[in-house]
Image (spheres, rainbow, N blue to C red):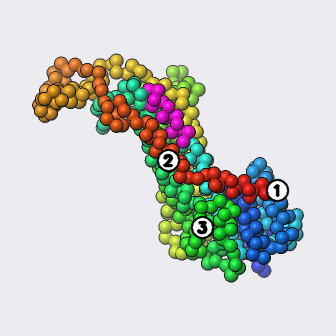
Amino acid sequence: MNKLWEKDFEVNKEIERFTVGRDRELDLYLAKYDVMGSMAHITMLESIGLLEADELGPLLAELRNIYRLAEQGQFVIEDGVEDVHSQVELMLTRKLGDMGKKIHSGRSRNDQVLVDLKLFTRHELMEVVEGVKSLFDELQQQSERYRDVLMPGYTHLQIAMPSSFGLWFGAYAESLADDMLFLQAAYRMTNRNPLGSAAGYGSSFPLNRTLTTQLLGFDTMDYNVVYAQMGRGKMERNVAFALATVAGTVAKMAFDACLFNSQNFNFVKLPKECTTGSSIMPHKKNPDVFELIRAKCNKLQSLPQQIMLIMNNLPVGYFRDLQIIKEVFLPAFEEMKDCLQMAAYIINKMTVNEHILDNALYDPMFSVEEVNRLAAAGMPFRDAYKKVGLEIEAGTFCADRNIHHTHEGSMGNLCNEQVAALMQETLCGFHFEQVTEAERKLVEG
C-alpha cells in the first residue's frame, strides 16, 4: 500500500524498517483516540463547508464502528500500512470510497498524532488518579486502624524517637495528596487541544478550532500553532515528572515495607498469598511484590530524563526523534497503574506487630520524652539532656512509655481528616465529568 506521503518512488525496505520502528505496534495504544479525533475533525469540516451534510453521517457511523473495534481490542494495523492514521483512512475508503479520503483535509499527521497523544494521556491520567486515590484511602484506613500502636522512629537507621503506625501509614497518604497536585497540573496542561495546528504552521482552510475543542472535551486549546507543535515531547515530559513523583512515594513505601517485614524488624506481616518462597529454604516468605513495585517505580522515576534526553536539543518544528518518545512513554501508564493496584491490595491486608516495644532494645528511644518531661518541670534543657544521657550510659535509664503528643500532625493528633480534605479539594479540580460527557456524546452520537 502507498504511504500517505509517497510520490513516484519506493523507499528502501531497510530504511522503511528502521524509520517505522515500533510505530505500528505502539499506535494500537492510540487507535480509539485517533478515531475520536477524526470524528470531531469531520464534524467541524462539515460546519465550514468542506464536507457535505450527506457525507458526514456515513463517515461518523463508520468511524463509530472502527471505534468499537478498537474498544474491543480488535483493531489491527495491517501489513504494509504505515500507522494508525493510514489504517483508519484505509478502512473508511474501503467502505465509503473517495469520501473516506476527505477526513484528512486541514490536518497533518503531526497535529493528528498530537491530539491522539493528548486524548490517550488524558484518559490514562484519569485512571492513574483513580489508582492514587485508592491507595490513599487504604493508607488512611490503616492509619486510623493502627493510630495508637507505637513503633520505633529512625534517623541514620539508628533508633531515634517513638513513632506510630498511624504516623507511618498516614505519612504516605499525605505524600500522595501532594503528588496529586502534580498530576492535576500535568492533566491541565494535557487537556488543551492542538488540533488545527496542522504541521505546526496552521492551515489556509477556515478551521473552527473552538468547535473541535468543545467536541473533544478539552478545557481550551494550544492557541499558537507553532507552540502546539512544540508541545510534542513537552507534554510527555511534564506528565512523566508527575508519574515520577507518585512513583517516588510508592518506591519509598515499598522499601519500608520490605525492611519492616524482615525478621530482624518484624514490624509488619504481609499476607501469605502475597509472598513467594525459595527453591531451597522452606521457611522463606519473600516480599517479591514490594520489591518489584520498588524496582518498577524506580524505573518510572527515570522516565522524565529519558524523554528530556531525546528532545532537549531539538529546535522548533517537528523531527522524527519525537517518535522514539512513544516507546518509553505509552507503556509507562500501565506499569504505574499496576504498581498502585498491587500496593493498595497489600496495604489493605497488611497487619502490624502491636507488641514491638515489649523488647527493651527500644527503651532508649524514650529518652527525648524524659528530657522533655524534666524540662517542662523546670530543669534547663541542657541539664536534662546531660542527666538522661548519663543514665543511659550507666544502664540506669528507665523508659516511661506513657507518652502524650497533642500538636497537629503528631501521633496523638494525626489530622487525617484535614489530609483527606486536601486530597478531595485537589480531586474536585480535575473536572473529569466534562471530559466523560464530551467523549460519550462523540462516540455514541
Write the residue at 45% across / 29% down. Answer: 144
Where residue 124 appears, as percent x and y from the top left, is 61, 51
Can you identify the residue that label 3 sits on?
Answer: 221
> How would you classify the magenta stretch by its main secondary structure?
helix
Q: Nearer the viewer, residue 380 or 420?
A: 420
Write the residue at 65% across / 59% down. Answer: 217
Q: Nearer the viewer, residue 372 or 162?
A: 372
Q: Is residue 112 above or below residue 72?
A: below
Label 1 and label 2: CA atoms lie apart by: 39 Å
| Eye-nearest disc, 3 or 2 | 2
Q: Residues within 10 Å of mark 3 (few under 14, many from 20)?
A: many
Label 3 and label 2: CA atoms lie apart by: 25 Å
Residue 137 falls within the magenta-colored stretch: yes
Marked residue nearer the N-terminal end (1 or 3) = 1
Residue 339 seen in render: no
Question: Element at badge 2?
Answer: helix
Residue 65 falls within the magenta-colored stretch: no
Q: Residues within 10 Å of mark 1 (few under 14, many from 20)?
A: some
Can you identify the residue that label 2 sits on?
Answer: 425
Marked residue nearer the N-terminal end (3 or 2) = 3
| Eye-nearest disc, 1 or 2 | 2
Question: Element at badge 1?
Answer: helix
Write the residue at 58% across / 72% down. Answer: 223
Where residue 413 appears, as percent x and y from the top left, is 36, 32
Can you identify the residue that label 1 sits on?
Answer: 65
Marked residue nearer the N-terminal end (1 or 2) = 1
Q: Is residue 283 left or right of residue 164?
A: right
The amino acid on which the numbered mark 3 sits, given as a three-letter code, is Met
What label sits on residue 423 in the rendered view?
Answer: none
